[in-house]
Image (cartoon, rainbow, N blue to C red):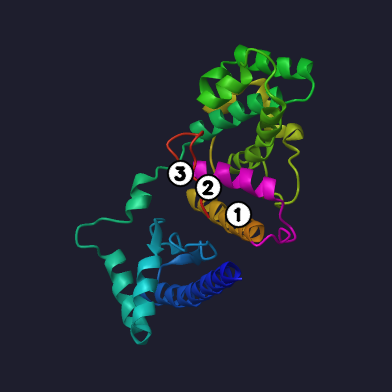
Amino acid sequence: MNFLRRWWDRQNERDAFKKGMIAFSKHCVAAVKHHVPQATRVRARAIWYGDQTRARVVWTDGSGRTWQWPLYLPFLAYRKAPEQREAIIERSLHALLKPPDDTGDEDDEQRVPRTAEQVAQRLLALVAVVWRANTREEIAQEGIAWAKAHGITAFLSPKEHDFIFHAQRPPQQDITNLGWRAEAMVPMIWALGGLPAMPPSNERSTSWSNPMLRRAMQSPAEFIASAALRPAVAVEDEEGRLLDEHWHVRDAQLRRQPVPPGLDAGIVIERRYALSWMVGYGDNWDDVPTDT
């Protein structure tokens, strides 16, 4: 009983913190609109996560530059002195807009978004991986032959290379797990202009019939050379949305509750993984953090 009570208390505290951050973020959005007249697309991001450390307000200024204002530290300051909310918000925003040493958020400075060429190469690598994960070995071997013929093996991660060129047919669990990478292909196809919008997060991939992907498979070198990404802010927004959905999935799993309607856990996790890689998280494809 004591364990259950402590767990319940932690959940209540977590929910209270989240609700407080949501309310605080609305005041921060209003502050940006007031103090940055040319700001457009002002919105709060990453407000639903478990630890809230990635919560921020994002906007685009008149020159097209994207700004990101981390909210976690000012929110902690506000919780200690709620009567100073407006002063805390203004000081934090002023420090962001006019930093004394021109330094920004350390995490964002270290995070470098992947280029169109890198995303195109990674998409082709995933084609080879998912092809190899086919339940019929003769079809899987066709995928291996395609990857070799077009030099796709150069784009594989170490784990993917081991999977595709396994001495024998890979274990069934690996085939199942890597087959789910078909969902990681979806946001890459979207980001490269092959889909007008991201499909719902409970709708399984139909990527094999996608016209852009079919052309890419026929002429990989040409596809890579001509690849172009959607604006970075659009990819960032989509990563934030999938991260929110991932939080809802993880929260339901921790509570042993059904996943919220409109979400499929496997789809959300794979698409979020791909988007987080695209915006610059992880040193390589095999090591992308998916914290919530």
- Residue at the image point whose x is 46% and y is 34% from the top: 284
Location of the N terminus (image quadrant): bottom right
**Element assignment for label 1:** helix
* Residue annotated with mark 1: 246
Q: Is the residue marked by circle 1 packed among few (<14), some (14-19), or many (20+) residues within 10 Å?
A: many
For badge 3, the amino acid type reads Tyr
Q: Residue furthest bottom?
A: 83
Q: Amino acid at mark 2?
A: Thr
Mark 2 → mark 1, Cα distance in angstroms:
9 Å
User: Considering the numbered disc 2 on the image, is that residue within a helix, a strand or a loop?
Assistant: loop
Mark 2 or mark 1: which comes first in sequence? 1
Expressed as whole percent of the image width and height from the top left, the position of residue 177 reads: 67, 34
User: Distance between the Cα atoms at labels 3 and 2?
Assistant: 9 Å
- In depth, the one of 94 and 107 nearer the eye is 107
Can you say whether 152 is above or below 233 in the image? above
**Quarter occupied by residue 188:** top right
Res 281 label: 3
* Amino acid type at mark 1: His
Give the residues drawn in magenta, as a range: 255-279
Q: Secondary structure at mark 3?
A: loop
Are circles 2 and 1 on residues that touch, CB within 8 Å? Answer: yes
Crowd class of label 3 (few under 14; some 14 to 19; many from 20; radius 10 Å): many
In the drawing, what numbered circle is on residue 290? Answer: 2
Q: Residue at x 39, y 59 (%)?
A: 67
Q: Position of residue 199 (x, y in %)?
A: 71, 49
Name which of mark 3 and mark 1 comes first in the sequence.
Answer: 1
Residue 198 visible (yes or no):
no
Disc with the residue nearer the chain's start (3 vs 2): 3
Disc number lying in front (3 or 2): 2
